[in-house]
Every structure is written in C-alpha cells, then in structure tokens.
Amino acid sequence: MTATGDAIVSPCTYADPGAMDALFAQLRRDDPVHRVEHPDYRPFWAVTKFADIQEVERQPDLFLNAPRTFLRTLAYEERARAATGGNPALLRSLVFMDAPDHAQYRKLTQAWFMPGRIKVLEADIRQLAAEVIDDMVDRGGVCDFAADVVPYFPVRVIMRILGVPRCDEPLILQLTQEIFGSDDPDVQAARTMTASLADTVKVFADYFRDLTAERRRNPADDLATLFAQAEIDGRPMADHESVSYYILVATAGHDTTSSTTAGGLLALIENPDAQARLRADPSLLPGAVDEMVRWVSPVRHFFRTATRDCHLRGKAIRAGDSLMMCYPSANRDEEIFDDPFAFRVDRPANRHIAFGYGPHLCLGMHMARMEIRIFYEELLRRVASVELAGDAAWLASTNVGGLKRLPIRFTLA
C-alpha cells in the first residue's frame, strides 16, 4: 500500500476538490497508468489521462464493463455475493453490461432520450424548474442550494419521465441519495429507511415491481409502461434487469444533474466575471452548461476489465486486470484543455469526457444538458445576485460526487 493508492481509494479525497486535483495532476505527470495495491481492495490500474481513457473506452471487446464496474472494498464484495447468491452485482443495468446485451438494452430507451423526443418535454421541464425556484424564493433570500433546492428539480423531471406519482418524491429522493452517497458519513447518519446499499436496492426493487405491475394493467406514455412491455429476444424483460433499468434511470438521471447544477453555481459565485458574462450574454449558456459538467465531473470513475494481455502507455496490462477510469482527472488534462483549472463559460471546443466515451456514452446526456440549461435560464432571470453564506461541503464518495452543502444568500431581480 502507498500513500498515492490510499488517496485514490479514499472517499475523503473526493470531498476535497483541491486535494483531488493535486493527486491527479501528480499522477498525470509522473505515473498516468498507476498500479494500486491496497489491502482492502482488489488490485487495479488508475488511468488518469484523457487519451488513455478514450483508448480503453473505444475498445469494448478488449476492456469489459463486467464483472467489476465500481470501486468496492473486499468486504463489500463478500457481502454482495452473500446477498445475491454468489453474484457480486446487486444490479444489472446498462453500466454493468457488455455486448451483445448492452446494445439490446440500450436500444429500448435510446429514442426516449434523443434531442427530438425530449424537446417535447421542454415546457414541462421549465414549469418544474419554475416551481423549484418558487420554493427557493419563499425561503427569504437564504438557503442551502445543494440540499434544499437542486435535488428536487431533476428528481421531478425523472419522475415525470418514469411515471412516478409526485406523492412518492420523498421516497425516490431518499433512496437516490443513499445509493450514491453511501460512503459519506453524513449520508450514513441520515439513513432512515435502509441500513445498507443492498437494503436500499431492495426497497427500490419492491417499489418498481409494483409500478411495473400497475402499468401492465394501465399503460401510459412513460418509461414505466415501456419497461412493463419491453421484450428482449422475444421474451419479456427479466425482473432483475427491469428493476435495474428503473434504478439506473431514477438515480443516474438525478444525482449527476443535481451535482452539476450545484457545482455550477459555486463556480459562478467563485468566478464573478464568468457570472457577469453569462448574465450579459445568455447565448453562452449552452457552452457554460458543458463547462459546468467538465468542472464538476460528477461521475468519478467506472472500471473496465482486460480480456487479454495488452499495453497501455507502456504498462503491461494482464488479462483479468482491472482499470479505473478517472474522469475528473481526464477533464483536467493539460494536454487536452487550455488552462484546465480555470472555469470558462466561453470555453471553445469543450471535449470533456464527463459523459463517458464510446459505446457507453451517457444515454441521458441530452436530457441533462437541457435540464441544466433551463434551470439556469430561469434562475438567472429571477435572481439578481448570489453569494456564499457559509462554507460549501462536498460529498465523500468515490462513485458519484458533488456538493452536499452550499449555503447562499441571494437577492431577486
């Protein structure tokens, strides 16, 4: 075990953006494909350069998603095997799949998330954004933007798409936060429904099984109906895969968008010139959204597993070796981005890799961009000024991360 390896696997590293950036900058410079051997984890390679991550992602036959998709401790993997009868995966959604299954399951919903399809939702999404900002305004000029405001917007959008009733919003929000923030001590202390990630998945699964049964009786224009009626190879989608798909849409569509929206506001507060430019020229907003996504890089990593011996940046990768794709590092790569540690709302040719790359490019990236753009259109129109009202705090999570606290003061336009 080394100090570098210990820092890579520690959730606390990802709760300190400065420490995270310094760690990855050192790795990109000195050892961009770094071997990590730690007593609490199976060994792996940390891949930190943009070009190397692209090389891995564009070769899905050489580098598989399964069987190792996320960084988990040995103890966690043993508990997961016990809970699933020997299979360490609690879920089997798109992020766990390889060819040929991945293409088949992705095709089920791909049309739903294309720009032409989601554009018909723009008016609904704008109304949801306005409702959330109304609630923010009612707080009287002070709020915790990360905890009290942004989580409610993407969760309502996802509920609208899935067909989940508004009355179940607290349940969906709680379960989503428990899935992605399970490393963070504040999230662990706030658990009120479940004692572990496996328990959280079970509550989600029970909920969505009931919703699927209801949609089979009463179809509607939503993803729940699509999942209820979906067939793979001429047969109804298996229960485990159906529940996993629900959870993927409900969680990935919520937490990453929420994290980017909150992190984007902190970046605008810390860079008043950028905020002034955006207010003066709203046409910059689509590009600013991509810069927010690059800046926050809410998905911290995915794993890939080599199917045969190969080399990556001179390192001998053996068949069966695991590789950790470090997306926040790639999005600060000095060889790709001019002045990568600057937040620029007018950054040209923003080739960030926060949505992934290759066959596993994020299915919901167009939706995420549209949601964040609409939210900021409404926020900047109604809020004249915003400043910090306390210390911001980031989630301690190696998986998906963002702000857990962002206390602000604001005045209305």
Image (cartoon, grey):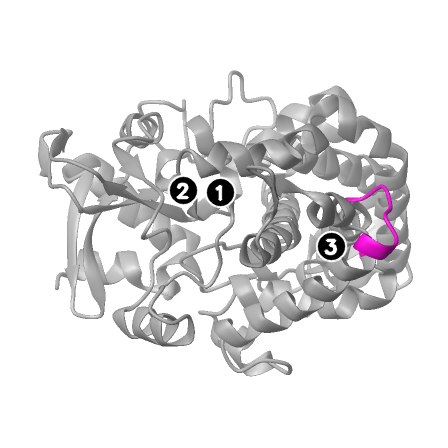
From which residue to which does the magenta span run?
Answer: 215-222
Query: x, y (%) of residue 213?
Result: 76, 60
| Residue bearing mark 3 | 155
Query: x, y (%) of residue 168?
Result: 80, 67
- Front-lying residue, 92 or 18: 92
Q: SS at mark 2? A: helix
**Amino acid at the residue labelled 3:** Val
Q: Earlier in the sequence, mark 1 or mark 3?
A: 3
| Residue bearing mark 2 | 328
Give the residue at x 61% y 53%: 242
Give the residue at x 42% y 70%: 84
Q: Earlier in the sequence, mark 3 or mark 2?
A: 3
Q: Quadrant of residue 107?
A: top right
What predominant SS class does the magenta segment belong to?
A: loop
Q: SS at mark 3? A: helix
Give the residue at x 60% y 65%: 177
**Amino acid at the residue labelled 1:** Ser
- The answer to whether residue 359 is left or right of residue 233 is left
Query: x, y (%) of residue 79?
Result: 35, 76
The CA span between labels 1 and 2 is 5 Å
- Front-lying residue, 268 or 218: 218
**Callout 3 environment at 10 Å: few (<14), some (14 to 19), or many (20+)?**
many
| Residue bearing mark 1 | 297
